[in-house]
Image: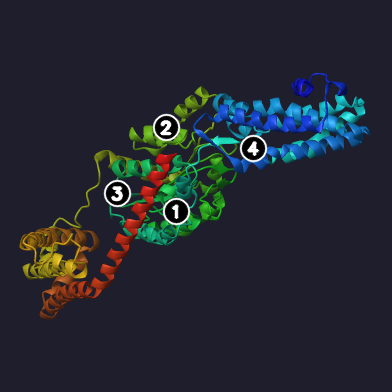
Amino acid sequence: MESFWRDFGRNMLGGLKLAAFMRVRAEDIRPSWSQLVALIVFGLLATFAADLASVGLNGRFNAYNLPGVMFYVPLSLVTAWGMALLARRPEQALTLAVALLALAVPIDLAEPLYRAGVRKWSPGWMRGAGYYYAYYLPHLWLVVAAAAAAVRIFALRLAFCVPALLIAAVLLGLPQGMNWQRGLWTERYDEAEGRSRYRALSNEDSFYLQPKLLERELAALKPGRKGTIDLYFVGVAGYASQDVFMKEVNSVSKLFRERFDTEGRTVRLINNAKSVADAPVASVTALKAILARIAEVMDRDEDILFLFLTSHGSKERFSLDFWPIDFKALDPKILRALLDDSGIKRRVIVVSACYSGSFVDALKDENSLVITASAADHNSFGCSNEADFTYFGKAYFDEALRETYSFIEAFERAKPKIAAREKEQDYEGSEPQISIGEGIRKHLAALEKRLKRGTAVEPPPAAAAPGKYAAFVDLWVTPELIASYRSECVRSMTMGSPAYYVRKDPNYFGGLNENSRQWPRLMVAWAKYSEEYCAAINNEKLFRQIYLDSYRRQLAERDLDAAVEFFRTEPGQRFVNSTNGAAVDLMRGVLDVSRPSTDRATRLYTEEQVRINADFQRDREAAGKK
């Protein structure tokens, strides 16, 4: 047993020297199958220890990665066999196999610590594409060390060095470099969160809800106001696996509603598991529909589109990614075609992504302002999951556009701030780009001037119009109509009274029923609630104001005069009365016919709510046991 541990120590020392490219002879290695097995076990322990040091105690043992960790063993045996054939010393294949397993131990110990160091302390050039290549440096170390070990143990001539290096690269380095599952101790995985994030869009409820969300956004867009330059904002968050893009679009859309008067003219398209029940997904199809709808409702001769796209990017492509959906690609030519096909004339387009400068040439024209977060051959930065903004988004939207209403001036203010932050982090400059069409300058200046004065107030069509519109509303909103609405409202409330629910479920109020002493109090409280509720939602003054605002916005004065002339005739008055009567009948009929359906919908929702709450409680209990 003593000799076993002595041989093991010599093999480990030999492996350490080989990993450091020091000279080791064949007689320095003590080959045996027992030593081979011992080195395999020790290698597993070394990998576990390195992972533990990298991840920390708040991790978990990952048995699924054990085959990936063990993958090095057959690769080492095959590589040793190949090298022995090259040296024509097949009898020493086991010697080299033991040496390769021994030299892998210090490399396995160093690799997780090296990667953690790269993530934390690497210079700026390495955090872009450089970080991707830095991942493979330990594999290169392994390949060169393995080839050097074969040359020294087999005492190969210089002519055999290149073949040895090729064998190590093909049989050992290439397969090992393609093996990503090699951590035995990994960060703790929240299974519930994983299901929520990675299966959010394939969930049946989300799948059927998405078309409705898009329809809602399309229907909610307000028309442009004649004589007012309105701004229509569309925010697109393309990449689902990082929250920064969703948070950026949400923050910028809020900024534009509050500061740039886009309330009712704002649309968000977001790829993120946290928003599937709130916003339509970001896809070429959704963007096309939104642009087409905006073109319908806006005044194309006055209004301006502000399109903001934020995501990852590659050269000539903006990333639209939300697993498991395979979205159509969005490149500069496709985006230009979408904009042209919509018919929207005046455009401000901001693309925040790596290599986004490749969009400038395709999108620029006389009536467009195009801004990108980087040059066509540069990265942009700040795409971490924890951040609220990318570097560009923070400087341009969250800082500059809070100080000015000028999109061009904001770019000039933001650019040096971005450069300073990148220099501080030792990043290569992103070099944001701008293209200003001469035709859009005066319209942007007019918009800026309006916004400085304050939010536009929709004017009546003419000075004399308010009285005409009020008179027109008097034809439709009468005390009799409001009384009928209130009456139908109270009747519908009676259909859903406590008595109705007790007849369906005697235990609905915990056993309280018509025979209980407290029942009259409950019915009086319900009647009072019904009266107050119906009076609140059927308020004559409120009705008149809503009608008045709507007619002012949608009906020109010349059309108003013709309508009033007709409705003051006897046939016109009969038309008004019959239309109001039909509205009351419609309310009554819908309530009567839809009651079974609404009851069923309420019951299904309540049952599903109970199931969801039970599932939530199980997750909480499971989390508490961990």
Q: Amino acid at mark 4?
A: Arg
Disc 3 to disc 2, C-alpha distance: 23 Å
- For disc 1, the marked residue is 281
Q: Position of residue 75 (x, y in %)?
A: 77, 39
Secondary structure of the residue carrying tag 2 is helix
Q: Amino acid at mark 2?
A: Ala
Looking at this view, is 39 or 449 the one in front? 39
Quadrant where the image shows the N terminus: top right
The extreme right residue here reads 88
Q: For the point 32% across and 64% down, which residue is it? A: 604
- For disc 2, the marked residue is 395
Colour convention of the picture? rainbow
Decide: few, some or many residues near mark 4? Use Cα within 10 Å; few <14, some 14-19, many ≥20: many
Secondary structure of the residue carrying tag 4 is loop
- For disc 4, the marked residue is 182
Q: Earlier in the sequence, mark 3 or mark 2?
A: 3
Disc 4 to disc 2, C-alpha distance: 40 Å
Q: For the point 78% across and 27% down, which residue is it? A: 145
Decide: few, some or many residues near mark 2? Use Cα within 10 Å; few <14, some 14-19, many ≥20: many
Q: Earlier in the sequence, mark 4 or mark 2?
A: 4
Q: Are marks 4 and 2 in contact (CB under 8 Å)?
A: no
Number of the front mark, 4 or 2: 4
Disc 4 to disc 3, C-alpha distance: 51 Å
Secondary structure of the residue carrying tag 3 is loop
Number of the front mark, 1 or 3: 1
Q: Amino acid at mark 3?
A: Glu
Label at residue 263: 3
Q: Is residue 252 above or below residue 413?
A: below
Residue 428 appears in view: no
